[in-house]
Image (cartoon, grey):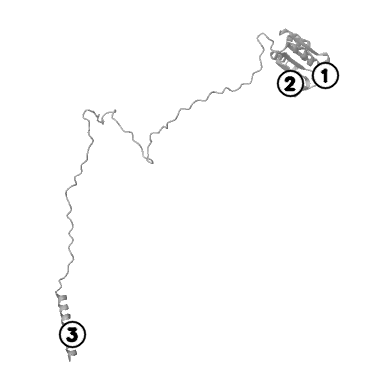
Amino acid sequence: MKKNITALLLAAAMMLSLAACGAKKEEAPAVSEPAVSEPAASTEEPNVSVELPEVDPDVNVPAASTEGPEADVMPEVNAPGSEGPSEPVTPEVMPEVPAEPVTPEIPAAPEAPAAGAADLNAFYLSLVDTYGENFPANMNLCDMVEMLDGFYPGLSGLDTKQMMIYQPMMGAVVCEIALVEVANEGDVETVKGIFQKRIDDQVAGGAWYPESIEGWKNNSRVVANGNCVMMIAYSECEAVVESFNAIF
């Protein structure tokens, strides 16, 4: 019996508790979201203070003139890629230090005849002018060292002031002249011996043809005046010798 009563009491207590909970739920007030208020925009301008540099009243600053041709104009500089000419920029160039001049070596020119001395080349040209085509000695052996040493051995080794040796292109023609001025008087006899050997070699068969050999034998001379020596093999050799002696 007691158990039943206890159970009833517990059931009644539970019913009361449920009823109380339902009443509390109905009485709870609605929760509203809080309103957010935006701050009003300020219409006042911010106070910004700018400090200007002090100007010395005693210093006169000229104002830029905008009138007349003498107005100060700032040069216009074109930006890269813009049209129109731009002022050339002259780079700073360091002055070059001139190098010491180098004097080129100039080969010594052939020694010209001294004043009053015989000009052997002028004498040769006078023969060409006088006899023309009949004086065909026009090939200078001095330009061909091997031939010079073969025909006049020992001559190129002497100290000479003037030297020219001409012969014709055809060896059968008897027309050969050798003109030499030696620097040393003692070499005159040496040159005369070299010239005479040339004549002897031609007479001994070097001239090949009988007529040529006879021409070298009968129409050749070796003469000397001072330090100048001439060998001539030519049909007019006597006239040439006379002209040669006349230039001294």
As helix, strand or loop, the secondary structure at mark 2 comes to: helix
Is residue 136 at all visible to an observer of this figure? no
Q: Amino acid at mark 1?
A: Asp
Seen in the picture, residue 25 relative to 171 is either above or below; the reply is below
Residue in the picture at 83% in, 15% down: 217
- Location of residue 102 (image quadrant): top right
Q: CA distance from mark 3 to mark 2?
A: 163 Å
Q: Earlier in the sequence, mark 1 or mark 3?
A: 3
Q: Position of residue 204 (x, y in %)?
A: 85, 19
Residue in the picture at 16% in, 83% down: 13
Q: Position of residue 3 (x, y in %)?
A: 19, 89
- The residue that label 2 is drawn on is 141
Q: Earlier in the sequence, mark 3 or mark 2?
A: 3
- The residue that label 3 is drawn on is 10
Nearest the viewer among 129 and 244 is: 244
Q: CA distance from mark 1 to mark 2?
A: 17 Å
Q: Amino acid at mark 3?
A: Leu
Furthest-bottom residue in view?
Answer: 1
- Location of residue 184 (image quadrant): top right
Q: Residues within 10 Å of mark 2 (few under 14, many from 20)?
A: some
- The residue that label 1 is drawn on is 201
